[in-house]
Image (cartoon, grey):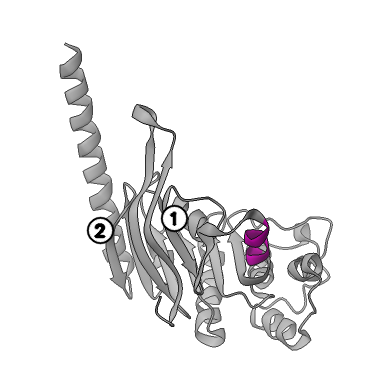
Amino acid sequence: MHRDTAIEAIDVVKDYGSGENAVHALRGVNVAFERGKFTAIMGPSGSGKSTLMHTLAGLDSVSHGKVVFSGFDITSMNDTDLTMLRRHRIGFIFQSFNLLPMFTAKQNILMPLTLSGGKVDKQWFRMLTQTLGLKDRLEHRPNELSGGQQQRVAIARALITKPDVVFADEPTGNLDSVSSAEVLGFLKKSVTDFGQTIIMVTHDAVAASYADRAIVFADGNIVADEANPNPDRMNDLLMQERRRSLTQQTVTAQVNSALLR
């Protein structure tokens, strides 16, 4: 593992089920993510992009291969070690925000430290909330915040522990275009200003254009790896994969129909 690599998948296979009903979600994936970079993972529904994120984050096991996180093989860790890893060294941002409604924005941001018994770095907290434009919203509860503000709280919560890697799962999926641009701008800023490593799963080519790199998934394999992605190029790649997938489905249906005659 190169010293500038934050996390790496090596020959990762993930199967669900067995026999004829087996689903091959990941088919021997090899990919490394550079420290301090923003990477987008794209692909059609069912392509394996979310499965890859879940295996990288230790939320799902692998069928074969390994995931190396900061030099540690997390596929050999037990549940307790994985929980501690996620609590202290990984941040998560979700599409649905996952904020606790009974707590204020400040309490939600500090929740990872509250759970782990960690000490609050007050300077880091002030920097985060000021950068994210939350300084005047810290005593508000989630239902008193806009969608964009709620997602900014979720970003601050993901960054408060200074994690090695932040995983963002469709972070703009529930936001309008203005709020989406705002949130993606803050994610990019956390990379450029704080040196954060971010891995984002998205179906949105515009969202992917904020990243330093975009990986396109199809049928459990990486089919494209683009530096400095732009929306038009990413849309073209996604459309190619959708057309190829539809063609393959049509051929399979025709073959099955012919076999049944």
Identify the magenta region: 80-86
Closer to the eye: label 1 or 2: 1
Residue 153, above or below 83: below
Q: Quadrant of the N terminus?
A: bottom left
The local secondary structure at tag 1 comes to helix
Q: Earlier in the sequence, mark 1 or mark 2?
A: 1
Tell me, for residue 199, which label it has, or none: none
**Residue closest to the eye, 242 or 167:** 167
Residue 239 in view in this figure: yes
Q: Three-letter amino acid code at disc 2?
A: Asp
**Residue closest to the eye, 127 or 65:** 65
Q: Three-letter amino acid code at disc 1?
A: Leu
Tell me, for residue 236, which label it has, or none: 2
Residue highlighted by disc 1: 52
Residue 194, above or below 1: below
Residue at 49% in and 60% down: 56
Q: CA distance from mark 1 to mark 2?
A: 22 Å
Residue at 53% in and 62% down: 74
Q: Is residue 12 rendered to the left or right of residue 59?
A: left
Q: Position of residue 250 (x, y in %)?
A: 21, 31
Q: Tell me the quarter of the picture where residue 202 sits.
A: bottom left
Q: Tell me the quarter of the picture where residue 164 sits.
A: bottom right
Q: Position of residue 118 (x, y in %)?
A: 78, 75
Mark 1 neighbour class, 10 Å CA radius: few under 14, some 14 to 19, many 20 or more: many
